[in-house]
Amino acid sequence: MGSATKTGIWIIATGVIIALLYLGRDILATFAMAVFLFLIIEGFGTVINNASRTIHIGLARILAVLLVVGGFVGFIALMANGVAEFGRDGADYEEKINGLIADIYSVAHLQDAPTLTHLVFDQGGQRFFATIANSVSGLSGDIVLILIYVAFLFTAQSMWTQKLDNIFPEPQRREAVRRIGNDARLAIEKYLWTQTVISALITLLTYISLLALGVQNALFLSALIFVLNYIPTVGSIVAAMVPPLFALVQPGVPGWVPDVALQESYIYAAIVFAVVSFWQFSIGNFVQPRMMGDSLNLSALVVLLALAIWGVIWGIPGMFLSAPLTVLMMILFAQSPHTRWIAILLSADGKPKGGALKEGEAI
């Protein structure tokens, strides 16, 4: 088979795979979220089991499930409480936002500045909020389905080894598959576990800082930051922007903020942005690389491209899963001498984890 024919087959196969991933995104993205949630729970269970040798791994998994589900329920409660709190002060927020809109129009030398009510209830605003409502409605159904998938993953876990033995009866091939699976699982588990710890650390420090600065609804904003930090690169940028935007429209500004030509809201938002960005930058650039080690080993450009590509294919779930999915692809590509060059391009140091399969190990 000529090289041109092989190249053509690769291009067609890649297009077919991307099309299948896109067309089946409602099912595949939900199942992928369930798998990674399962790995997070497994990671917590392993940590609990290692920390206390008296706790059996089965009990440790139950505690991990309760911990993750409890954290998820707590997050939903925080979101609901935060929305309710913003609703109670809705009139004050609306007045402040209308003033900011008027300032923007004045600086731009535009006339007839619209109000927040006009922007929300025009055709564009109605379409925007209808899209959000549909997304939230779909997310509720996806969450239930994800939890069902996770439950079945736990029940099927005990049979995986036996199924693997039956699928690959030859010891060499079975060992090769097991090695690839272990490499992928350990890399993804370490990434998810580290990302959870890093997000929790940034969230805690940001929450304390927001309280000290007098930002209203600091717990709600900190919970948003925790979730956003799971999105590589772009998530940390958005997380650094959210608290300053809320501080900018906050009805009351703390008395310690200097009043310079009635621009104290802008000064206050700039201070909040500097503090929040400090935690994002310092922890993301100094603490996270030490904890992550070589479990990610993805080029920074690849991370951004993966975020964009998986975001287009699977939407928001794809953005959250872009890094671990790309790590998985890199490990799989590294196993074959024909595709190892792709893994080298994806890696940060040109040394992707997992060597090519030895002769006789082909799967």
Image: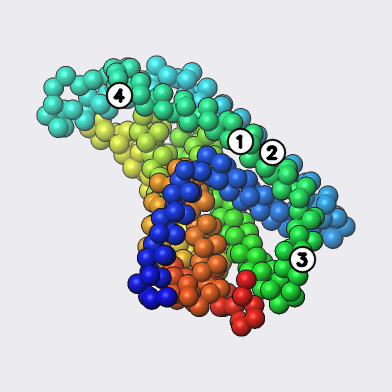
Q: Secondary structure at mark 3?
A: helix
Residue 143 is tagged as 1
Residue labelled with disc 2 = 148
Task: Measure the alpha-carbon separation of dots 2 and 4.
Answer: 37 Å
Q: Can the viewer see residue 148?
A: yes
Q: Earlier in the sequence, mark 1 or mark 2?
A: 1
Q: What residue is shown at x 50% (from left), y 43% (from top)? A: 25
Q: Earlier in the sequence, mark 1 or mark 3?
A: 1
Q: Against 152, is 140 above or below? A: above
Could you say where residue 180 lies in the image, as x and y percent from the top left?
63, 69
Task: Measure the alpha-carbon separation of dots 1 and 2.
Answer: 9 Å
Residue 124 is tagged as 4
Q: Nearer the viewer, mark 3 or mark 4?
A: 3
Q: Characterize the local packing of mark 2: few (<14), some (14-19) or many (20 or more) Cα atoms within 10 angstroms.
A: few
Residues marked 1 and 3 touching at CB (< 8 Å): no
Q: Can the viewer see residue 287?
A: no
- The residue type indicated by label 4 comes to Gly
Q: Earlier in the sequence, mark 2 or mark 3?
A: 2
Front residue of 98/128: it is 128
Q: Characterize the local packing of mark 1: few (<14), some (14-19) or many (20 or more) Cα atoms within 10 angstroms.
A: some
Q: Count how many numbered circles sit on residues in the image.
A: 4
Q: Secondary structure at mark 1?
A: helix
Residue labelled with disc 3 = 165
For this orientation, the residue located farthest to the left is: 109
